[in-house]
Image (cartoon, rainbow, N blue to C red):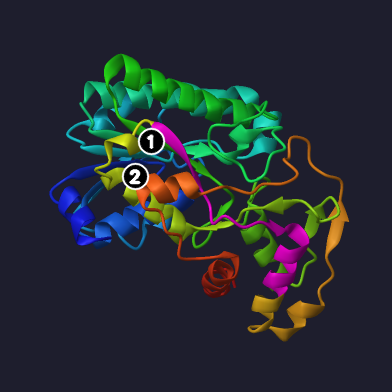
């Protein structure tokens, strides 16, 4: 954090919804390291209490066990708050296909509750987690913010609706917001377990156990994998920007390079082999592609660089090395 950013946030109060989750807990930890007052709201449906262990007793930290589907919980969490980092959501395309109703309740109704509560609390700025899934069936690469396609899943629809609601709350009520379209974020504290686990922690855990990772399709699908520290930087830049032209729009949050799933597994095997040389001999298996998956994802980050001074420090290789080190120490 720069001295200018720190000055803007000095004596301010930040609410992080979904603060016990992967991205949310990293944001909480970062803000607290600069002695900024943080309230975390989480219902622990996907967030984990162990993600809060390192700072739960920090004098500037407060935990509210609440659900964004409950408007009163949202209002209580927003009381005396200056800024909101809204990370709470039900992620996963497959989960939304399996259970579209709950995904909509959390991601749309819950989002609307947070907007209403933020407006009534006179929150200065509402930063929210948008998604690269919004690009849908658009085949153009790289993805630029103003050109989206038709959504390919219930999850993608909910995240696009978030952007529409945020825009309306600015034009109608004057609530300033910024949406951050995350591209395949990975790093410390990302959960490797469960049916909807993200590919990197899931593959790392399998390789550590000497199990064969299973790639959906032939491995040619590609993603713009984005290390968590780049995402934290982007949230802080969005929170503290003094550029009025940077507000009330959406940004890609990525590194700006794409990696195929075959390349990803090769890198993971290479980096994990430095801890256990047997891992380099583990076979990779394949199965059919998943319904709703986008074949290729690559972000243009020019808008974020121009308007929010975004300067991602970690590419896929340096990010994976950091992540693998963390997982090796925490998964065994």
Residue 15 shown left or right of residue 287 in the figure: left
* Dot 1 and dot 2 residues touching (CB under 8 Å): yes
Residue 330: x and y, percent? 53, 70
> Relative to residue 63, is residue 178 depicted above or below?
above
Instruction: Sort mark 2 into few (<14), some (14-19) or many (20+) by Cα contacts within 10 Å.
Output: many
Give the residue drawn at x 65%, y 84%: 274
Give the residue drawn at x 40%, y 25%: 166
Q: Which residue in the structure is indicated by mark 2? A: 238
> Relative to residue 321, is residue 262 depicted above or below?
above
Q: Which mark is residue 178?
A: 1
Q: Is residue 320 visible?
A: yes
Number of labels in the image equals 2
Q: Magenta segment range? A: 249-269
Give the residue drawn at x 32%, y 28%: 74
Q: Secondary structure at mark 2?
A: helix
Residue 169: x and y, percent? 35, 20
Residue nearer the viewer, 129 or 110: 129
């Amino acid at each position: 954090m720069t001295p200018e950013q720190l000055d803007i946030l000095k004596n301010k109060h930040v609410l992080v919804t979904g603060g016990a989750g992967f991205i949310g807990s990293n944001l909480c930890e970062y803000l607290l390291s600069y002695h900024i007052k943080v309230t975390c709201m989480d219902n622990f449906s996907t967030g984990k209490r162990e993600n809060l262990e390192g700072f739960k007793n920090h004098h500037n930290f407060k935990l509210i066990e609440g659900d964004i589907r409950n408007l009163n919980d949202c209002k209580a969490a927003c009381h005396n708050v200056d800024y909101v980092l809204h990370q709470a959501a039900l992620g996963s395309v497959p989960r939304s296909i399996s259970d579209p109703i709950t995904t909509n309740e959390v991601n749309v109704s819950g989002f609307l509750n947070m907007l209403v509560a933020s407006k009534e609390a006179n929150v200065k700025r509402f930063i929210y987690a948008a998604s690269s899934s919004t690009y849908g069936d658009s085949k153009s690469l790289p993805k630029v913010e103003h050109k989206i396609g038709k959504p390919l899943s219930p999850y993608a629809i909910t995240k696009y609706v978030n952007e529409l609601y945020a825009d309306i709350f600015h034009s109608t009520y004057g609530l300033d917001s910024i949406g951050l379209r995350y591209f395949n974020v990975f790093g410390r504290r990302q959960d490797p377990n469960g049916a909807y686990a993200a590919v990197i922690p899931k593959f790392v855990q399998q390789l550590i156990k000497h199990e064969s990772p299973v790639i959906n399709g032939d491995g040619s699908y590609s993603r713009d994998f984005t290390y968590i520290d780049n995402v934290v930087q982007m949230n802080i830049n969005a929170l503290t920007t003094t550029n009025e032209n940077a507000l009330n729009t959406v940004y890609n949050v990525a590194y700006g390079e794409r990696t195929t799933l075959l390349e990803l597994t090769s890198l993971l095997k290479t980096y994990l082999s430095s801890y256990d040389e047997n891992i380099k001999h583990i076979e990779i298996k394949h199965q059919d592609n998943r319904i709703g998956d986008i074949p290729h994802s690559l972000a243009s980050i020019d808008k974020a660089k121009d308007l929010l001074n975004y300067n991602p420090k970690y590419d896929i290789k340096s990010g994976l090395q950091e992540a693998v080190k963390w997982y090796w120490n925490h998964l065994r």
